Image (cartoon, grey):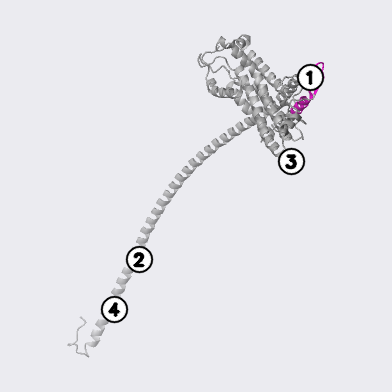
Amino acid sequence: MLATANFLVPNATVLVEIGVFAAVLGIVARFVLPHLRAAMDRRQEEIRSSIETARRAEQLLAAAEAEYHAKLTDARRQAGAIIGAGRSISDHLETEARQRAKEEHDRIVARAQWDIDRVLAVANDQLRQEAARLEVNARPSLDLSGAPSWR
Amino acid sequence: MNTQTLAAAGRIDIGVHDTITLGGATFNTDTIAASLVAGIVVIGLGLYVRLRTTSGVPHRAQLLFETLVSATERQVERTIGPTGRRIVPLAITLFVFILIANWLELIPSGSPKALPSPTGDINLTVALAGFVILLVHGASLRARGVRGYLHHYLRPSPWLLPINLIEEIAKPITLALRLFGNVFAGTVMATLILELFPPHLAPLPLLAWKLFAMFVAVVQAFLFALLSVLYFETALKPDGGPPPGGDPDDDRAPAGGPAVARARDEMPAHTVPTPTER
C-alpha cells in the first residue's frame, strides 16, 4: 500500500538533510582531515629523512670500506717488503754460516791429517829403530841367509 | 501471485515515513533521526581517528581514512591537478557518510523500520546530489568565469545546447535516484523476505540478502563519491582539449558506467598540455 503522499517527491526534509550533511562535512573537513593529512605528511617526512640517513650511512660505510681496503693493501705491501728483507738477511746469514762451517771443517780435517801424518811418521821411525835393533841383536846367533830379509 | 503473496502485499507499506508538519512543510522525522545517527557515527569515527592519529604505525581506522585520502588525492590530482585537492574532503565525507547511512538498516533491530537507512528516503539523496551539483556548478563558474561557464553549454557545437542542458539536469537526478533506488529496493527486499517466508525460515534468506546489501552499500557509496569527483573534474579541468572532431573534453555521458570508463580513457590525454589553450 503506497503512502498517501508520493514518496518519490522530496519534501522539506531535503533542507534538513542538506544541513546535516553540511555539518558533517564541515566537522570532518575542519577537524579530522587536516590532522590526518599532517600526520601523513609527517610520516612521509620521517620516511624521507630516514632514507636520507640510510643513504649517508651507506656512503660512510663505502668510504670506510675503501679506507680499509687501502690500508689492507698497504699493510700487505709492507709485510711483503719485511718478509723479503728478512729472507735476504736469512739467506745471507745462511751463506755466512755455511762458509764458516766449511772453513772449520777444512781446518779440522787438515789438523787431523797433520796428526795422522805425525803419528805415522813417529811409528815408522820407531819401527825402523826396532828393526835395526833386532837386526843387530839377531846377526850373531842366527843364520838368516835362507830367511827373508827386512830390507 | 498466490494468496499468501497477496496477503503479504497487503501488509507491506513502502515509502511510509513518520512525519511532522511545521508551517505547511512536511518533515520525515525517521529519516532525519537516522541521518543524524549516521552523521554522529561519521563524526565520532573521524574524531576517534583524530584523537589517535599518529605519524607512526597507524591503527585500523586511521589506515582506512588514510587509504581513502590518498586514493582520492591521486584520483583528483591526476585529472584536475593540485587545485582538485579542495574537493577531497567532500568526496571522503560523501563516501563515509553514505556508507554508514546505507549500513544503518543492516544492523539487526527486529524490523527494517526501527533504524531505516536514511539513504532509502529520496529526501537525503536529493539533498546530497543537490549539494554536490551546486558545488560543481559553483566551482565551474569560479574556474571559467561567467562567460566561460555559459560558453561551455555550447561546446562542442551550439546545436548541442539542448543535450548539454539535459545532461546537466540529469546529473543530479541520476545521482540521487541511483542511490535511493538501490537502498530503497534493499529495504523492500528485506521486508518482503520477512513477510513471505515463515518466521522460522526467514533468517537464512535475510542473512544472505543483508550480506549482499552490505556489498551493494559499499558500491553505491563509492559510486556516488566517484561520480561527484568526476563531475568536479569535468567542471574544473581546462576547457582546451584536442582539435574538433574527437573532443573527449565533453562529458556527455550522464550515468555511471560510461562516465567512469570515459574518465579512465581520458586520463592519459590530460597529462600532456593541450595545444589550444583558451
Which amino acid is tagged 4?
Gln
Q: Looking at the image, which residue sits at the far left?
A: A145
Dot 3 falls on a residue whose secondary structure is loop
Q: Is residue B29 magenta?
A: yes
Q: Nearer the viewer, residue B17 or B231?
A: B17
Residue A124 image offset from top left, x and y in percent: 27, 76
Residue that label 2 marks:
A108
Q: Which residues are magenta?
A: B19-38
Q: Secondary structure at mark 4?
A: helix
Say what amino acid the circle numbered 3 marks.
His
The residue where tag 1 is placed is: B26
Marks 2 and 4, the one that precedes in the sequence: 2
Q: Which mark is residue A126?
A: 4
Instruction: Name the residue located 81 percent from the left edge and 21 percent from the top edge.
Output: B20
User: Where does residue B44 sit, x and y in percent of width and height?
Assistant: 75, 30
Q: In the image, is residue A45 above or below residue A76?
A: above
